[in-house]
Image: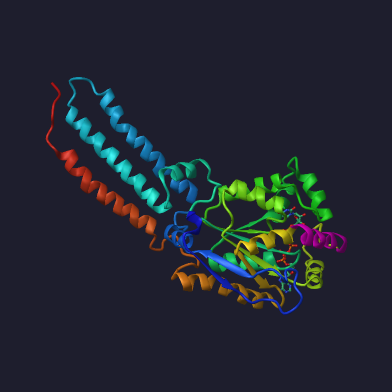
Amino acid sequence: MWRRVASLSRRVSSSKSPRLLDQAQVAYEFNAWKMFTTQALNQAEGGASDGRKIPFVTFVLELLLFPVILMLSPQKVNLGTCRRWGFAFSFIGSFGAFQTMKHCKSSLFEAFKLAHEPHKLQRNDFDLIVTGGPGSGKGTQCTRIVETFGFTHLSAGDLLRKEISSNSENGSMILSLIKEGKIVPSEMTVKLIQKAIEERENDRYLIDGFPRSEENRIAYERVIGAEPDMVLFFDCPEEEMVRRVLNRNQGRVDDNIETVKERLKVFAELNLPVIRHYSKKGKLYKIDGTGSEEEIFERVRPVFAALRGRLEIKKLEIRRLSDHSPVWRSKLVFILVSLVFALPLMLTPNVTRT
Ligand SMILES: Nc1ncnc2c1ncn2[C@@H]1O[C@H](COP(=O)(O)OP(=O)(O)OP(=O)(O)O)[C@@H](O)[C@H]1O
Ligand SMILES: O=c1ccn([C@@H]2O[C@H](COP(=O)(O)O)[C@@H](O)[C@H]2O)c(=O)[nH]1
């Protein structure tokens, strides 16, 4: 499968104190091909899905242009001119599509799917799941990953809280489930995540605090059409998680001892099976979630550095839009090559239909 063209595995040591996932195999896998192509496309165009739709549509329109011009051309018209221009446009359109596909590393079919199902993962996307118990520090570490490694942050909890504050029809139901420490039905959460994925302006994103159950995971993978690339699990002792939640002081309705106890129960019963699943798949990184925020991030950093080192990815960290973007370079090459081929066609002598 294309998502598995090249991968590498490594074991990462972790726990000192008793852990929720002691028996879990701690491994990670990284898809070299995917990361390379992610880098090749990068986020330079800001709005990957939209940016990729346009050349495909142009391609179809331009391919149609040639026969349409021929059909519409009256008998006595100078056919040579029409044909030359039609052919030149068709050629430019085909070459444009070829360039699009080259960058998507995809077939024409994938280019078509991309235009119509922007939430589905494409070869260039890199999705990271960040998981852990309540108060394990997921959100805190996600903020740092976003700042350092240029991921877009999609927090399932934040999306649900936004839904509550927007007074949507499901808002009150979501609020009561959060207050009780229970999991919101998959279809609601997946719908919000799907929308956020469609609206993202980056092909490298992380989902914080989701999937929380096997049902969540299956629903997500069905919608996305693939498994996530990598899963980070912040492993933290229960007493430390409780301490952090009770000290959070951000006015969250679920930051109280009754709810946190329920959340821990739900985590052990429903979330740990998801973590074990990804561990078996070789996608899991277990990070020791104890110590200061800085200490924990120093354990996260090598995960990304290892990827970069092994795969010779030089610029994984945030790149400015103005950096030497391969997309812009290829567009320039595309225009120049098209002109070289199209000019002789346009300049050939006229042939008039008799
Ligand atoms: N290493 C740490 N040491 C002490 N406090 C921390 C540490 N990391 C995060 N915190 C604090 O603990 C609280 C919970 O952290 P955070 O919100 O990142 O956890 P979370 O796993 O996202 O929690 P939840 O699942 O409940 O949203 C926050 O107040 C945060 O500032
Ligand atoms: O995928 C999800 C994510 C969250 N919930 C509910 O929201 C709260 C708070 O989530 P945080 O990620 O800790 O902010 C959680 O306890 C669940 O009730 C959910 O149901 N599904």
**Residue 217 against residue 281 in the figure, above or below:** above
How many numbered marks are there? 0
Does the magenta portion include 261?
yes
Within the displayed image, which quadrant is ligand 1 positioned in?
Answer: bottom right
- On the image, the x and y values in percent for residue 203 come to 51, 56
251 lies left or right of 127: right
Does the magenta portion include 322?
no
- On the image, the x and y values in percent for residue 15 come to 70, 77
Residue that appears at 25% across and 50% down = 337
Q: Residue furthest right?
A: 258
Coloring applied to the structure: rainbow
Q: Main secondary structure of the magenta part?
A: helix
**Residue 268 against residue 84 in the figure, above or below:** below
Asked if residue 9 can be seen in this view, the reply is: yes
Q: Toward the viewer: 265 or 331? A: 265
- Image quarter in which the C terminus is found: top left
Residue that appears at 56% across and 61% down = 151
Residue that appears at 74% across and 71% down = 236
- On the image, the x and y values in percent for residue 62 come to 33, 36
Q: Residue furthest bottom?
A: 16
**Residue 324 against residue 335 in the figure, above or below:** below
37 lies left or right of 350: right
232 lies left or right of 56: right
**Quarter of the figure with residue 147:** bottom right
Asked if residue 314 can be seen in this view, the reply is: no
**Quarter of the figure with residue 141:** bottom right
- On the image, the x and y values in percent for residue 56 come to 40, 42
Q: Which residues are magenta?
A: 257-270
**Residue 80 against residue 103 in the figure, above or below:** above
